Image (cartoon, rainbow, N blue to C red):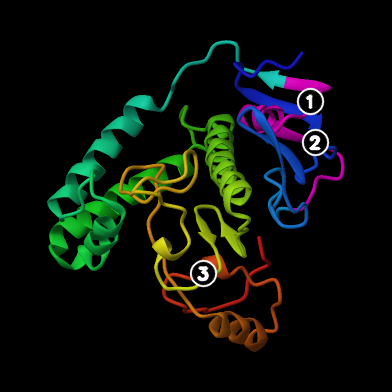
Amino acid sequence: MYNAKLPGSWLVDLSHIDLSKVKVGEEWVELDGSMPPSPFTPKGERPTGPARYATPTEAYAVELGYHVAPVEAYVRYDNGRYLDGWYNRLRDAYLATMADLGVDADLPPAGFLAAMYGYNERDPELAIVVSAIKATVKGGLGKLRERTRGEGWRPDIHAAVISRTRINLHRKIVKHAAFTGQYPIAILSDCVVYAAGGASPLDFLPYRDGKPLPGGFKLGVNPGLVKHEGTQSVLWGEEVRERFDAPELNLARYIKDGTVTDIDNGE
């Protein structure tokens, strides 16, 4: 019996989930089923059979309105919020340092975009601190899946963190699509690329009276909110795909400054 409160790994078939009709909140909505990527595979393709998923992924399948029937599970009955203290300290350090660089947590959307422009050039030493905090987060999570001599090897916790992050992003994509009819043209682990009529996120994000779509993308410095990664032209995207003969090139990987050093496999 599936239990969303138990962290672990579940063997379950999610191939029946149809992203053309999903629940958003309490309402069923219809989407273009060919557009939103599946949150259940690395390349966004629909699953073809049973696979192992972390608890947040399976819980999201239920949230979308579909029944799940796992056939096997490895769960942790003894569990807790293992990373809370670590996360809170790093979050507070990041927000305090960014505030010192002029990027406050309560800035309005346009003010936030303006403050983020060139923030790392205002104080090179503080910029190093920001980079160190980000590296600590990424490196700390990476250590959970590295085999070590101590007790730091926790691939189960690593999988749960990645699962929750991926699901949170997909939830925003679905809510944005349901409200606006817009779908991303490229997705990376923490970056989503949309076609827009202008160079600013405000040219397509559905803000009304300064307030974002509930549950959608919201600009801000707090973890969980989004920032502007970069803008490139459609011609840039077509040119790099043609130059590298890579139609599946993931543009989200290179959108920041437009530099493409090598091809990828589209994941």
Residue sitting at x 47%, y 78% = 258
Of mark 3 and mark 2, the one earlier in the sequence is 2
Is residue 127 toward the left or the right of residue 184 in the image? left
Residue sitting at x 69%, y 78% = 246
User: In 3D space, how far apart are the residues under numbered discs 1 and 3 (Cα atoms)?
Assistant: 37 Å
Of mark 2 and mark 1, the one earlier in the sequence is 2
Residue nearest the observer in this picture, 152 or 230:
230
Q: Are marks 2 and 1 in contact (CB under 8 Å)?
A: yes
Magenta span has 203? no
Of mark 1 and mark 3, the one earlier in the sequence is 1
What is the three-letter code of the residue carrying label 3? Ala
User: In 3D space, how far apart are the residues under numbered discs 2 and 1 (Cα atoms)?
Assistant: 7 Å
**Place of residue 175 in the rendered image (x, y in percent of width and height, measured from the top left):** 58, 44
Q: Which residues are magenta?
A: 45-73
Residue sitting at x 45%, y 41% = 141
Kind of element beneath mark 2: loop
Q: Is residue 204 above or below residue 81?
A: below
Residue where numbered disc 1 is placed: 68
Residue where numbered disc 3 is placed: 196
Disc assigned to residue 14: 2
What is the three-letter code of the residue carrying label 1? Val
Crowding at mark 2 (Cα within 10 Å: few <14, some 14-19, many 20+): many
Q: Is residue 238 above or below residue 167?
A: below
Residue sitting at x 75%, y 44% = 19
